[in-house]
Image (cartoon, rainbow, N blue to C red):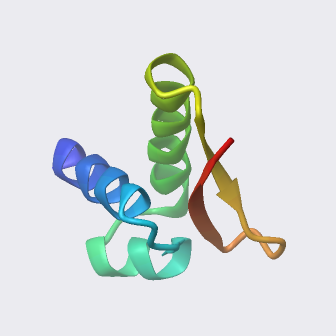
Amino acid sequence: MKTELMLLLYDALLEGQNVRRVNFCREHDISQRTFYRYIRELTDFFRRHKPDYVIGISDDGGEYFLNKV
């Protein structure tokens, strides 16, 4: 399940979609803590393997998106 959810997040971000934390957690029945852990792991992955990309967070902290630096 973890791998599938991480891939869903990765795919959505690469496609330019904004990922709303509350919606993602509700749709996939995971806690916000788990969501934060997945985002942290993806952030680390992008730092190591795709340094031109950074995961951004909306001002209210509810949406995540991918920025090209």
Q: Residue 39, relative to residue 63: is it above or below?
A: above
49 lies left or right of 4: right
Query: Residue 49 or 32: which is nearer the viewer?
Result: 49
14 lies left or right of 44: left
Residue beneath the point at 45% across and 62% down: 31
Q: Residue 53, relative to residue 4: is it above or below?
A: above
Query: Residue 29 or 54: which is nearer the viewer?
Result: 54
- Return the x and y of residue 17 as percentages of the image width and height: 45, 72
- Return the x and y of residue 69 as percentages of the image width and height: 68, 41
Task: Give the number of marks.
Answer: 0
Query: Residue 52 or 25: which is nearer the viewer?
Result: 52
Residue beneath the point at 39% across and 55% down: 14
Residue beneath the point at 68% across and 55% down: 56
| Quarter-of-image position of residue 15 | bottom left
59 lies left or right of 22: right
Q: Residue 49, relative to residue 29: is it above or below?
A: above
Query: Residue 35 or 64: which is nearer the viewer?
Result: 64
54 lies left or right of 9: right
Determine the residue located farthest toward the top in the rendered image: 48
- Return the x and y of residue 59 as percentages of the image width and height: 83, 72
Q: Residue 51, relative to residue 2: is it above or below?
A: above
- Return the x and y of residue 23 as percentages of the image width and height: 45, 82
Residue beneath the point at 50% across and 17% down: 48
| Quarter-of-image position of residue 5 | bottom left
